[in-house]
Amino acid sequence: MHSLPRALPPALIPSSARLWLMLLAGIAALFALAACGEVDDTTEIGTDGSGTQTLAVTVTDTDMERIDGGAATVEATIEENNPGLNYVGMEKNGTDTIFTMTLEFTDAEDYAAKAQPVLAAGDLTKTAEVTFTPPSPPFSSGYTLTRNFTPNDLTRWVVKALVEDGNIEDAEEGQIDSAIDEGDVTVTVDGDELEKQMGSFGAEDSAPAWSNAESAGFGSVKVVTAGADDPAADSFTRTITYDLDRSVYLDAKDEFDAFFEEATPEGGELKPAGDAGTEWVITFPAGTAEQVGTWTDAALATEGSTFTVETAPSEDDPFVIETRVVDDIECTAACGENGTLEQALLMPVDKGEGTEEVSLDGGPEPQVIRDEIVFTEADYDLTVNRDGGGKMVMALSLPAEDDAVVTEENVVAFLGADADRSESDGTVIYTLRAEADDSEEFTGALQKLGLEGADGPPLVSVTDRGDGSYAVSLELGAGSDLISKLGEDATWTIHGDGLRPTSILSDEAEVASLGDDAVTAKGEHGVVLTFAAERAGLGIGGIVAIVAGLAVLGLLIAAAVIAFLHREKLSSLLRGTPATGPAVAPGGGTGPAQNPAQGMEESRNPGSSTPPNTSS
């Protein structure tokens, strides 16, 4: 008798065979749960955005056999675990059993709010999002619905509950998403069916859209705003320029005409394109930043337009004024799919005599525009003597309103404590001075003013060419720190002290000219030039020597006069004897001067006398 073959122990089964057995078991488990049902979705929406989404889950008799307890178990599971849907009931349709649930909503926001707990019940973490866009003539003639959840997402909680309760044969949690297929999905608005839109590269978007809208938009929209240079006044004007294809306009002429009329605020101006033109222009009246935002909403068929302007000195540099602008505009409706939006500020230039457009990026984040305040004029008055020394007087001018913004304290901190301030006719002038006798000392003094040479310290050099002729070479100008705060207007006036300029030998910038007694140069904040000069009068050293000599001579003359007037006293002092002179005798007469002691002696011895000495 032959014995029946016995199953091999698992350890004796070849590894490749074990792999195939595991794969077949997985496939069997997958098919055991796959296609257990199908869910159809019908969403009906009214023109006001309210509606009902109906979910119909269909399970065949064959699939129902895999569910422990059949249809009664499915219905009980729905009723016990329902997270907020309206359960309509179940019905038999041939060999199919259909379970119907609905979700009613008043608008897109209510729709998303009611879908959220249903998604959460199915262990989905996404946030429900819904938009409903009605027609926006003349830009859109239909409706659009977007939502980021599927009918399978809204019924996942049913399968999850059946699997967790062990009511589906051989089902595991990882197979929940494959248990129900997506059936037909239909979206209608006011009875008209919307078409599902395809995303980029032919794939459906993660937030699918259904639409029957036909859009028509502007080719481009340009928004230019003026008044940002004085935000404290809170008065702005805005001009919106629309470019509209003529054929698009004619297709909806009445609607576009009505739009332009309604988009023009009271007090504003509408400039139509004319019979064959393509450009329409709306100019707002002067208004506050808030009004500009509101008028922009109407002009671009949008909501939430924001315009704000703030101006303040920079924390890093008080000469820099920072203008922070928020110009947040949404142009989806008016610009359509292919239109462009351009935004700009109209800012003054050339001391307010002109304007320029400053481009804006737009969006909710502030864009910072930096405007640097500079000294509008710089006057350099330079005097050079024959020793290369001299004097520099540098006067820098600021409009009084700019000086008030930067403040005197900050200007003096930049220029140095020696800067003198004066004000006249709306202009503030800061004056700095440097002076020295010779070239070496003068160079150091000029450096302290912020002046530099081409490749180092400033240069002032005087060369004696003989016969009373000199060559004066200059290489100096505003240094890097100072030049950053200077405008275009600059004037150099160069004099000689004991020198008279006679000709210009070289001028690198070619801006210098020779006057009667000075060299002038305009439009540059530096000079690199050499001019010839002849001796003229006395230099400072000569004048000082003459003054000193005169002072000494004056002292000598004064001493001589005093000596003459007191010559006898000085002579007596030098001989060591008392000075002589007429004496007054008793009784008022004159006679030899008498020593008081001698007189007293004679009064005591009236008979005695001393004979005169005649031996001489």
Image (tube, helix red, strand yellow):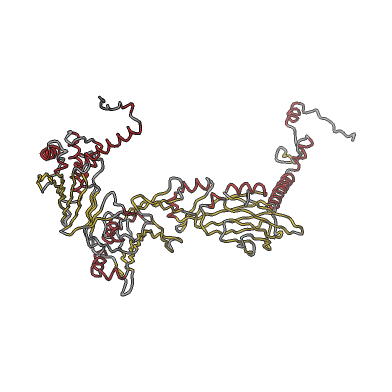
Q: Quadrant of the C terminus?
A: top right
In the picture, measured across the screen, residue 409 lies left or right of residue 463, that is: left
Residue 107 sits above or below residue 585 on the image: below
Residue 323 sits above or below residue 518 on the image: above
Q: x and y percent of residue 53 in the render?
A: 16, 50
| Residue shown at 63% from the left, 58% from the top | 495
Q: x and y percent of residue 368 in the render?
A: 40, 51
In the picture, measured across the screen, residue 589 lies left or right of residue 407, that is: right
| Residue shown at 29% from the left, 61% from the top | 334
Q: Quadrant of residue 186?
A: bottom left
Q: x and y percent of residue 330 in the render?
A: 30, 56
Q: Quadrant of residue 228?
A: bottom left
Residue 99 sits above or below residue 235 on the image: above
Hey, which residue is sitting farthest right in the picture?
615
Q: Quadrant of the N terminus?
A: top left
How many marks the image carries: the answer is 0
Q: Quadrant of residue 298?
A: bottom left
In the picture, measured across the screen, residue 412 lies left or right of residue 596, that is: left
Q: x and y percent of residue 392 in the render?
A: 60, 53
Judging depth in this view, the residue of 385 and 524 nearest the camera is 524
Residue 601 sits above or below residue 480 on the image: above
In the picture, measured across the screen, residue 459 lies left or right of residue 220, that is: right
Judging depth in this view, the residue of 300 and 451 nearest the camera is 300
Hey, which residue is sitting farthest bottom in the picture?
275
Judging depth in this view, the residue of 57 and 576 nearest the camera is 57
